[in-house]
Structure formats: structure tokens, C-alpha cells
Amino acid sequence: WKKCNEVFYCGSILVPLDHLNASDSRRISIAVVKFPAPLKPRLGTIFINPGGPGGSGADLAKGAGPLISALTGGHHDILGFDPRGIGASNSVICYPSASAHAAADIAAQTFSFPGFHDSPISFPAFGALSQSAAATCETHSPNLLPYISTAYTNRDMDLMRSALGEAKLNYWGFSYGTFLGISYVNLFPDRVGSVILDGVTDPTTYTGTSDAWTRTSLTDTEAVLDGLGRECEAAAAASRGCALAKLVSPSRPTVASLLRGAMDDLDAAPVALSTGSVVPFLSGLHAASAVFGALYRPTTWPALADVFYALLDPAQRDPLPLARFLGAQAEDDVGAYCPVTDDAGRNGFLAVKCADGVQDSTDVARWEKEAKRAETEYSPLIGRPWSLMTRPCSFWPRPAERFAGPWNHTLSNKVLLIGNTLDPVTPLASAKVAASLMTDANNVLLTQKSYGHCSIAQISTCTVKAIQSYFIHGTLPEPGTVCEADKSPFAVEEEEEGLAGEAGVLSAEQRARVEEVAAMVAKANRV
């Protein structure tokens, strides 16, 4: 370990490239970041993962370690690590240079997905693009891709646990991080300490076909969008803001229908921008991106409503607030377009997901059929791109090890599962599936009545108390526990201040900063 600054410690650990081949002497380096426990007695270490796959745990620790420490009670070191092939841990490289990678990303954004809003790409061309994406990664990282599976990352985690001198592994994983967690506890069932799986993905479909995972991931996506509309309407009715509700009409009688209609309007008549932005115009694709991104984070709903009000209000018709909301201005993200160093980027998602799932069909006609079904039956908002985003996996090299269950090993400690009632990409139904697979003897499921992705999307004092009690005392909530969010997404400032003073678990400043954790988790898990 060495100090990164006044607060954090940084380090690395060498692990076998191929865990299952003892004669292979190759090693890779796993980057780790630690925030030391501020309170005594120190109770060990909590490993964290923001999801993805492909999210940086080291960045999560550096960006939110003190806050996660507060959320968990302050008695544990918080340890974030970049999983193998990600970030600073021997990142998967798929292009000859960072600039070539950036150019490829811009091209991919331009092509988007066939049939999705104004995408110019055909399905046959998308099939070739998917095959190329797999081939270029295999060309530039041929000796790494077979070893970038969750199972191998689990083995890295166990070596880190051992190196820390801890008998059991404590862990808090979000989104994909729940698969990382559920696979660890079933590979190493006698080494399970306090483990939280928050925003649970269905492990049976995550390791299955693209269509199956799309279906189970997007169960509640449209319901969350409808909930956004209802919350806006309720706020307007109670004189708590959300002017967007004033624009409802007989043809678009709800706020949700206004948002869906705005996507159709922008597809039919894109709006030009005159500010030199990276995105020179706004189309339905941009509106859909803004709306879908906001579904992860209910704290952004007032801002989303404001930018669409500016766009749709006949007295304004101003597209710039939406452009800024999207971060479309060139000066907001210069580094993304002129990078000096390269890492896996989105290819980190593919490297892990393709290793963990089955090798799907290469039949592009089948992809087209399944994409249409995802759009019409699962989620008109995001079903099509979700169905298509993993198609390079059809051409990906197979992993040295892949874990796909069983999920019911007898564990040395019960795991705490947390599921929101309306999560746009990890629905409560998936948490219930995981809980059933693990059996009652091995887990307790806490339900949080809230919107957004993972429990941190809306603060619940009840949930925070349960998390702290579990990590500090090993005490789980009663089976069937339901926790309410502390406030609505459109709560006014006076209500927020009252709740902050009333809670007693986190300070007002810490409660405000939970949004930073939610933002990092959302970024790690966005399509």
C-alpha cells in the first residue's frame, strides 16, 4: 500500500492470469484503492463494485469511499478494485491507439442500433460491425480475453481477501456487482461474511441468451417512466413545481405521454443546434437517451422535466437545456474525443458479459426478430438497443472458466438482497428469482419502495439502518421487510431539510452526496 493522498491508500496485487493452470506462470496486476475505517473498533474490509460489467471499483472508492463508509457505519475499510481487464487492471485493449478507439466510439454512436430512432445502419451492416468489434478485441488482446470472466474475478477477490488476512469476505455490489457477488458466494460458500447484493440481476438470464436477459432486465422500465410522469403531475397539483405537467392535453393526457411523444416529434423533425456542440442536432434518439438515463436517478427528474418543458412549451421551444442536460456541448467532454491514454471503455462490458453468457446465435435475421420483440413487448423506450448491445458476443472467444450456477450452496452467512419496487433495469422480480434460487436458508430480501437503480437512487433511512446493522452487528432485517423512500423525487427543499434533520443516520451533507454514488453506479451500468 502507498498513500494516494491524505485520505486514500492505493496498491496492487499480482494474481495468476489463468487460475486453473498451475503451470502457467503469467501474472496480471489488479489495482486496488482503500479508504480506511474512520471509527473504532475496525471490523474488517468491505469490497465494493459499481456494476457494469466494466465499472471501476477503484474509481468508486476514490469518488465515494468516505460516503460508502458512512452508509455502512464507518467501522470497515472500504476497498474498491478494478476487475481484471478493466481500468487499471490490465485493461482489455481493442484498438491500435487511444485515438482510434475514440474514433470507433464516435462511429458506434453515429450508427446506433438498426431500427432505433434515426439510426442509419441496416441489420446486415450491424452484423458485420458486431463481428468486427469481436475480431478487433481478439486481435489486440488475444492473450487476455479468455481469462476475463466473472469466475476468474471471483478467484482474484478471494486472493485479495486472503492477502488482507481476513477469514470471510464482506461485500456490497450494485447491479452487475450482484452477479459478481452471487457467483462469489457460491464458488466460496465457506468464506461468506456480510454480503449485500443491491439492484439484483437475474443470474440465470445474465448467463443466458441476449433475449432472455433483455426480457428479465426490462420488466419495469416503462412502469418507471409512467411513475416519473405521475410524480410530476402530483407535484404540480400540490404546487411543488414540475411545470411540464401544465402541457398535458387531450392528445397527450399524461406527462409520460408527453415525453414519449417528444421522442416521436424529434424523430419526425430533428432540432438544429447552433452552438458548435458535438451533437449538432437533437433527435428522438437524444430524447430517449435523456429519459432513460434519468430513470436510473430520480433526483434528476425535476431537471429532466424542466428541460423538456423548455423544449415543448410553445412560448419557448428551446432545445439548449436538453442539449446541456445530455452533456452534448463539446467543451463538456473534450477528453473523450482526444484521449491520451486508452482503456477498455465499453469493450470492458463486452469482455466480461461475453465470457459470462452463452455464445448466442450469429443469425442476423434472428437478431432482428428478437429486437422487434424487445421493443414491442419488453420496452419501447430501450428494448431494441438492450437486445442488440451484446451481439458481438456471438463472435467472442470462449472463456477458460464460466460460472452459471448452481446458486444454492449452503453459505457460512446469510446474504442481504435489496430490490427497489420500480428499478428500470434490475427489477424486483429478478431479486425474487435470486432469493428463491439461493433458498431462504441463505438470504433475506429487503424491498425498498422507491424508483431508480439500486437502493441509493432514493435514500431510505430504513434501508440505511438495515445496511449498517448488518455490517456492524451481523443482524439481518426480518424476512418480508419493506422500507419506504424518505421523500418523493419532486420534494421541495423544506421537506428535504426536515427529513435530513430527522434521520439521524447520515448528516445532511452526506445525504446530499449519496447522489454522487448513485451517479457513479448509473454511469457504470448505462447502455
Image (cartoon, rainbow, N blue to C red):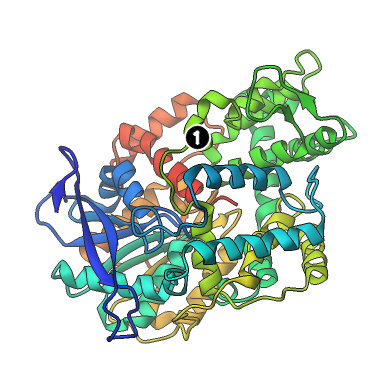
Please name the residue that numbered disc 1 is placed on: 338
The image position of residue 17, as x and y in percent, is 33, 73
The image position of residue 22, as x and y in percent, is 28, 86
Quadrant for residue 6, please give it. Answer: top left
Describe residue 171's horizontal placement relative to residue 202 as left or right.
Answer: left
Vertical placement of residue 163 versus 384, above or below:
below
The image position of residue 465, as x and y in percent, is 32, 53
Quadrant for residue 261, please give it. Answer: top right
Describe residue 526's horizontal placement relative to residue 463 as left or right.
Answer: right
Describe residue 450's horizontal placement relative to residue 152 as left or right.
Answer: right
Quadrant for residue 194, please give it. Answer: bottom left
Vertical placement of residue 488 versus 20, above or below:
above
| Along the viewing direction, whichever of 450 and 108 lies nearer the viewer | 108
| Along the viewing direction, whichever of 189 and 360 lies nearer the viewer | 360
Q: Residue furthest top?
A: 315
The image quadrant where one finds the N terminus is bottom left
Q: Residue furthest left?
A: 41
Residue 122 seen anywhere in this rendered image of the structure: yes
Q: Secondary structure at mark 1?
A: loop
| Labels in figure, total | 1
Describe residue 135's horizontal placement relative to residue 43 as left or right.
Answer: right
Q: Residue furthest right?
A: 251
How busy is the neighbourhood of tag 1: few (under 14 within 10 Å), some, or many (20 plus)? few
Looking at the picture, which amino acid does disc 1 mark?
A: Cys
Residue appearing at x 65%, y 61% in the figure? 132
Vertical placement of residue 317 versus 124, above or below:
above
Residue appearing at x 43%, y 31% in the figure? 496
| Along the viewing direction, whichever of 123 and 441 lies nearer the viewer | 123
Residue appearing at x 23%, y 68% in the figure? 160
The image position of residue 366, as x and y in percent, is 80, 71
